[in-house]
């Protein structure tokens, strides 16, 4: 009897279940992946569009920008200009993967291996995700945020809420902590607040109420004027997290506005690890699905035609057009990520002399899965490339580095894939993936709290690259709306 | 344990809220685009989805972006080197973004292109009808509020037994029983059983004491069950209803159309389109709108919608028969105290000689005092339209109706000669009064 899990392109739930178990068996027992429990959901194409126009989250608060994205994606999809993603996966526990109903059975298998095990393992083990995101809490938090924002809309009006969200979204990239957790209020400050509150209550006490006849309650004391979020002079400067600074210190914001800023800031922080690990995350998932699908074929679980279909889709996913190709749109994270994972495996199993020079600790060690897991757990794109990009890959991709000075009429080729250039190319590529350099580095330098409350921001120009002029003014206008007073943004040399 | 969840059957349109917000945000641009796209379309197509192209102005999402083209220096790595050696120079492309940076431009919110998306019929109509309303609707509707209705008004502690709210009552009873620790029947039965068992045993002193204690406990439980009732009057809740006046914002729209021989294919078609638009407008703008279709030749009859638009008939033309018919129906079914009355008439302006005068008399004496609004659409061919460029000149009916219009503010006359006229005329007839 044939051991094949499926033969038809059509899928049904029984087949899905059987296939999932087979994949799970390989992932957990052969590859020894460590994953959150899985929850797999089948969705229609409209729902898929829906999901990825709201940051890939199933429960997202409402905002017009998500509607805009949906309208655009929908028109692109209907017009046939773009296909849909096959899957979406959410960094949560249980880890939720969405499968598109139109996928063939082979594609479903690929996607399960890719998302439910590849991404899932990465989410659970990478240090950035461990440190910065709370997989157990995210869905509840999203539900809270959605509810809170719609309650605010009801209470304060859509326009009010929208203008806060617009401004907060504009600052999302400047709304993350890169190096440290947000400071907790000190114990003294909490005690001080408590003391002020008690003092106020004592002051508000009125002897007259005691003379009321029995059974009549005195009116409740009005809420204390000591607002938890009230403006105070306790600021640590410079501060890189603009949203945090404004949330805590803007003079005129009301409590709910601060809460909305906090929600957006938390979302930005939640997505920050994903932005730093695109190459690794996709590389890990792609490597895992490639390995699992091939093992399934080797064990006679999937047919030759399924393998061919899988390979076709795999190769188109990891296709890297060259820089002068019309299709070129930056380095493809799937291509680079997968190639690097595969390369690590090769170095572990069949190293060349060059590899022995470059990666003495890996070369020939044989334990490729261990090496990969270590990389997945402890690196982000920048450090991963700096550490693991091999000369062979630099040659394969024919990578070369250009130096660009704004005032020059030409780019200078700084390094290419040759003996003298490997390290240079590798470092420069790694730098390209450093979000600290790619994002504008803007810091709060001070605020004139005693005077006219002007907020002073500073953009530290990395190698003299200024902010885009028009968008800068628009964003500053947004900051002024939140801050409520003038905002000055200066650009200074690093 | 893995769960497969089939979400395909979940309600659709989850992003509808976001979409509405987006449409609202880009309102000005969308309105222009919709008007433009409707201008060239046939009225019959109004109920279709359409592609709208708007610029991203007003829906930009600015972020801080670096602009390495302006100043400063940077390095970047590209794949696919062919012949370059270190030290080579590559000329920067003139204008436009450099290779590999195509995406930067759109991310910055600057180079973002116009984008196209599909709007549903509902959304298009919403925008088209946005600033239109049925004239004078509110005034009489407030005056004529007469009917009242019973409405739910929460829960009360007193009421008639037929209105007992069982769920609330039983919930309260259970809460009270729990709070007062009423022994359940099962507990009492258990004690009785236990007592029975003890009494069957060999009597001894300790046993007697135990039996007495148990008996006491049982008696207490039974008496407690008595004074803590299963249901107490304080538990009972009643549904409460109050009488509330309901505003009658109901209106009836009489659609009168000439289908006689003098109305050619083209005229009928234009009239049809006008009514279709009107029909869509009424159906969507107001909940309670009755529509009566009356077509006439030398005699008038009431017909259903299908027949009104699609069946053919011919004969002479006596416009006043339609007014007669309309008045007859109004008397029978639509009293002015309950209904706001609107009339829209379409004709080519030709009627039997003398009939126009009779129409004017009827309008002045009988029809206009009843009506909130009367719209008369005259359908001309394009040559006639040029001849009758001025509003003062026209066919017999037109001239006659002009005198009515002078007398009554809520009487409007307009001319249509080609499909493109319909939208502007329609908008003009029903535009919101500026207060």
Image (cartoon, coloured by chain):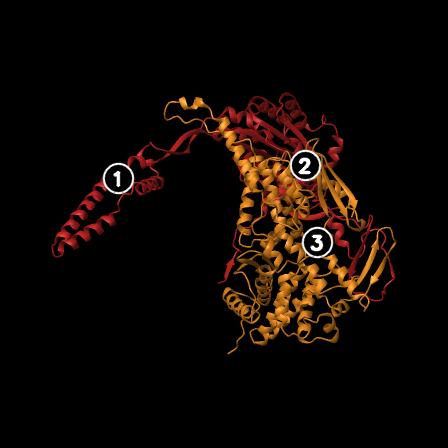
Q: Mark 2 and 3 residues: CB-CB less than 8 Å, in contact?
A: no
Q: Which residue is mark 2?
A: A481
Q: CA distance from mark 2 to mark 3?
A: 27 Å
**To which quarter of the image does residue A48 belong?**
bottom right
Residue under the image location 26 percent in, 39 percent down: B228
Q: Residues within 10 Å of mark 1 (few under 14, many from 20)?
A: some
Q: Which chain is rendered red in the image? A: B
Answer above or below: position of B376 versus A98: above
In front here: A237 or B138? A237
> What percent of the width, then of the height, locates residue B235?
32, 37
Rendered image: mark on residue B271: none
Q: Is residue A108 visible?
A: yes
- Is label 2 in a helix, a strand or a loop? helix
Q: Is residue A399 visible?
A: no
Subunit of label 3:
A
Q: Residues within 10 Å of mark 2 (few under 14, many from 20)?
A: some
In front here: B307 or B200? B200
Rendered image: mark on residue A435: 3
User: Of label 2 and label 3, which has the lower sequence position?
Assistant: 3
Q: Mark 1 and 3 residues: CB-CB less than 8 Å, in contact?
A: no
**To which quarter of the image does residue A310 belong?**
bottom right
> What percent of the width, then of the height, locates residue A471?
75, 43
In front here: B175 or A439? A439
Q: Residues within 10 Å of mark 3 (few under 14, many from 20)?
A: some
Q: Which chain is rendered orange in the image? A: A
Residue under the image location 64 percent in, 75 percent down: A366
Rendered image: mark on residue B228: 1
Q: Mark 1, mark 3: which one is toward the viewer?
A: 3
Residue under the image location 66 percent in, 34 percent down: B427
Rendered-image quadrant of the C terminus of chain B: top right
Subunit of label 1:
B
């Amino acid at each position: 009897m044939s051991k094949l899990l499926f033969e038809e392109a059509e899928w049904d739930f029984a087949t899905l279940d059987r296939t999932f178990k087979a994949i799970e068996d390989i992932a957990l027992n052969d590859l020894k992946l460590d994953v959150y429990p899985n929850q797999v959901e089948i969705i229609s194409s409209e729902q898929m569009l829906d999901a990825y126009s709201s940051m890939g989250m199933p429960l997202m608060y409402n905002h017009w920008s998500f509607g805009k994205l949906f309208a655009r994606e929908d028109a692109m999809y209907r017009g046939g200009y773009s296909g849909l993603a096959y899957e979406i996966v959410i960094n949560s526990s249980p880890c939720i993967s969405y499968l598109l109903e139109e996928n063939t059975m082979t594609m479903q298998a690929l996607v399960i291996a890719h998302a439910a095990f590849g991404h899932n393992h990465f989410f659970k083990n990478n240090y950035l995700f461990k440190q910065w995101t709370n997989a157990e809490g995210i869905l509840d938090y999203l539900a809270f945020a959605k509810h809170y924002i719609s309650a605010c809309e009801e209470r304060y009006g859509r326009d009010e809420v929208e203008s806060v969200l617009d401004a907060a979204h504009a600052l999302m990239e400047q709304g993350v902590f890169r190096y440290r957790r947000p400071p907790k209020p000190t114990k003294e400050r909490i005690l001080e607040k408590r003391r002020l509150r008690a003092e106020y209550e004592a002051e508000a006490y009125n002897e007259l109420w005691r003379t009321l006849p029995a059974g009549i309650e005195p009116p409740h004391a009005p809420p204390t004027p000591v607002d938890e979020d009230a403006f105070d002079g306790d600021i640590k400067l410079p501060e890189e997290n603009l949203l945090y600074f404004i949330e805590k210190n803007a003079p005129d914001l009301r409590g709910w506005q601060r809460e909305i800023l906090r929600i957006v800031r938390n979302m930005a922080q939640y997505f920050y690890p994903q932005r730093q690990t695109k190459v690794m995350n996709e590389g890990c998932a792609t490597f895992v699905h490639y390995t699992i699908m091939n093992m399934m074929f080797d064990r006679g679980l999937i047919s030759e035609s399924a393998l061919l279909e899988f390979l076709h889709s795999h190769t188109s996913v990891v296709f890297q057009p060259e820089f002068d190709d019309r299709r070129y749109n930056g380095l493809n994270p799937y291509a680079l990520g997968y190639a690097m994972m595969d390369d690590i495996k090769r170095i572990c199993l069949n190293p060349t002399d060059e590899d022995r020079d470059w990666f003495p600790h890996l070369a020939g060690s044989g334990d490729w899965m261990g090496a990969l897991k270590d990389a997945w757990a402890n690196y982000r794109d920048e450090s991963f490339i700096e550490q693991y990009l091999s000369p062979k890959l630099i040659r394969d991709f024919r990578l070369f580095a250009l130096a660009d000075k704004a005032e020059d009429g030409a780019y200078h080729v700084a390094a290419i894939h040759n003996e003298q250039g490997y390290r240079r190319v590798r470092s420069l590529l790694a730098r390209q993936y450093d979000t600290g350099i790619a994002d504008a580095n803007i810091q709060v330098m001070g605020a004139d709290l005693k005077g006219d409350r002007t907020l002073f921001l500073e953009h530290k120009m990395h190698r003299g690259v200024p902010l885009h002029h028009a968008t800068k003014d628009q964003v500053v206008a947004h900051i002024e709306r939140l801050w409520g007073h003038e905002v000055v943004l200066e650009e200074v040399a690093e | 344990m893995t769960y497969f969840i089939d979400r395909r059957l979940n309600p659709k349109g989850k992003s509808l809220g976001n979409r509405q917000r987006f449409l609202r945000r880009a309102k000005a641009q969308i309105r222009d685009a919709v008007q433009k796209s409707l201008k060239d379309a046939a009225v019959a197509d109004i109920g279709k989805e359409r592609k709208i192209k708007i610029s991203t102005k007003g829906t930009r999402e600015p972020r801080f972006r670096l602009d390495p083209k302006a100043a400063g220096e940077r390095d970047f790595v590209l794949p696919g080197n062919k012949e370059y050696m270190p030290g080579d120079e590559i000329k920067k492309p003139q204008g436009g973004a450099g290779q590999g940076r195509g995406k930067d431009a759109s991310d910055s919110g600057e180079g973002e292109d116009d984008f196209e998306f599909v709007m549903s019929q509902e959304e298009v109509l919403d925008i088209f009808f946005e600033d239109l309303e049925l004239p004078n609707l509110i005034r009489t509707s407030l005056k004529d509020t007469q009917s009242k209705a019973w409405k739910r008004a929460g829960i009360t502690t007193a009421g008639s037994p037929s209105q007992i709210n069982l769920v609330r009552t039983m919930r309260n009873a259970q809460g009270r029983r729990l709070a007062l620790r009423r022994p359940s029947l099962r507990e009492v039965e258990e004690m009785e059983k236990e007592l029975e068992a003890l009494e069957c045993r060999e009597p001894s002193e300790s046993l007697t004491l135990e039996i007495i204690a148990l008996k006491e406990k049982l008696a207490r439980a039974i008496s407690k069950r008595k004074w803590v009732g299963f249901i107490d009057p304080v538990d009972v809740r009643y549904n409460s209803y109050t009488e509330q006046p309901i505003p009658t914002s109901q209106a009836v729209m009489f659609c009168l159309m000439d289908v006689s021989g003098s109305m050619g294919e083209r005229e009928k078609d234009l009239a049809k389109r006008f009514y279709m638009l009107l029909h869509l407008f009424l159906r969507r703008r107001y909940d309670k709108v009755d529509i009566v279709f009356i077509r006439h030749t030398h005699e008038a009859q009431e017909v259903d919608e299908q027949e009104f638009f699609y069946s053919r008939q011919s004969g002479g033309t006596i416009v006043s028969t339609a007014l007669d018919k309309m008045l007859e129906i109004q008397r029978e079914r639509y009293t002015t105290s309950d209904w706001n009355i609107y009339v829209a008439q379409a004709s080519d302006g030709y009627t039997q000689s003398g009939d126009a005068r009779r129409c004017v008399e009827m309008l002045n004496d009988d029809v206009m005092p009843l009506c909130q609004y009367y719209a008369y659409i005259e359908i001309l061919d394009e040559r006639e339209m040029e001849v009758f460029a001025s509003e003062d000149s026209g066919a017999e009916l037109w001239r006659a109706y002009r005198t009515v219009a002078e007398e009554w503010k809520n009487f409007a006359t307009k001319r249509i000669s080609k499909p493109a006229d319909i939208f502007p005329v329609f908008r003009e007839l029903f535009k919101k009064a500026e207060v």
